[in-house]
Image (spheres, grey):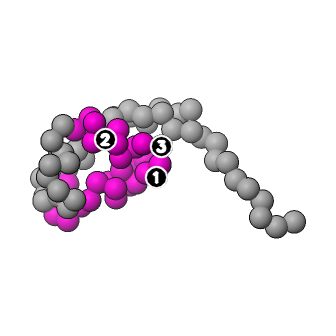
Amino acid sequence: MTAVSGQSYLSKDGDVLDEVVFAHYGDTSGGKVEAVLAANPGLAALGATFNAGVTVFLPDLEQDTQIETDQLWG
């Protein structure tokens, strides 16, 4: 597990939370979007697309460093 440091992001017009989370954490799996929503009360009430100037706090989250893969052939 590797810690990702918390920081704030200031939105640009047209940003959506999934893209902000993906850009910061590298994916949206494991409840990352839900964790960011929990760390930002009222953020969901702003709608799916943000206006410019919305501050989004991106909390410290634990990330798995291993990726489980399956071999499909051979």
Tags 3 and 1 touching, CB below 8 Å? yes
Which residue is under mark 3? 30
Residue at image coords 22%, 44%: 56
Q: In which quarter of the image is residue 58?
A: top left
Q: Is residue 72 left or right of residue 13?
A: right
Name the quarter where the C terminus is drawn: bottom right
Q: In the image, is residue 73 part of the stretch drawn in magenta?
A: no
Select label 3 or label 1 by which is in front: 3
In which quadrant of the rendered view does residue 18 lie? bottom left
Q: Which amino acid does label 1 sit on?
A: Asp
Q: Which residue is drawn at 28% across and 54% down?
A: 17
User: Which residue has dot 2 on it?
Assistant: 36
- SS assignment at label 1: loop
Could you tell me the amino acid type at mark 2?
Answer: Val
**Residue that label 1 marks:** 27
**Mark-to-mark CA distance, 3 and 2:** 12 Å
Q: Earlier in the sequence, mark 3 or mark 2?
A: 3
